[in-house]
Amino acid sequence: MTVSQEKLLAVLREKVEAIDESTRVKGYKKSVFLSLAEIVVLERQHRQSAIQIQKRVSDQCQALGRILSDTEWTPK
């Protein structure tokens, strides 16, 4: 992992940690950060071997959406 990717993940973690989870699904911050980290990895793989990045990012977003929609939560 390059320094810029490490910095990017640090910034993403900082921003995600700043989210107020009290009005969101329990585990929201963790799920969002893990999804973002996976997208960063996908981007690196895409640059190295031209993977189908658009489909994989879309799959990652859909998986996060399923996690969030399957969790029992009602907005306050």
Image (cartoon, grey):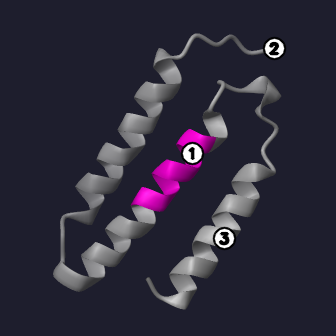
Q: Where is mark 1, residue-wise?
A: 32
The residue drawn where x is 70% and y is 52% is 16
Contact flag, marks 3 and 2 (Cβ < 8 Å): no
The residue drawn where x is 33% and y is 66% is 42
User: Callout 2, which amino acid?
Assistant: Lys
Marking on residue 76: 2
Marking on residue 10: 3
Name the secondary structure under disc 3. Answer: helix
- Relative to residue 38, is residue 4 depicted above or below? below
34 part of magenta stretch? yes
Contact flag, marks 3 and 1 (Cβ < 8 Å): no
The residue drawn where x is 66% and y is 25% is 26
- Relative to residue 65, is residue 51 depicted above or below? below
Name the secondary structure under disc 2. Answer: loop
Between 55 and 18, which is closer to the camera in this rendering? 18
The residue drawn where x is 24% and y is 53% is 55
Identify the magenta region.
30-38
Rendered-image quadrant of the N terminus = bottom left
Indicate the position of residue 67 as horizontal and vertical percent values: 46, 27
Mark 3 or mark 2, earlier in chain: 3
User: Callout 3, which amino acid?
Assistant: Ala
- Relative to residue 65, is residue 48 depicted above or below? below
Mark 1 and mark 2: Cα distance apart in space: 20 Å
User: Callout 1, which amino acid?
Assistant: Val
For the view shown, which residue lies furthest in the bottom direction? Answer: 3
Indicate the position of residue 68 as horizontal and vertical percent values: 52, 26
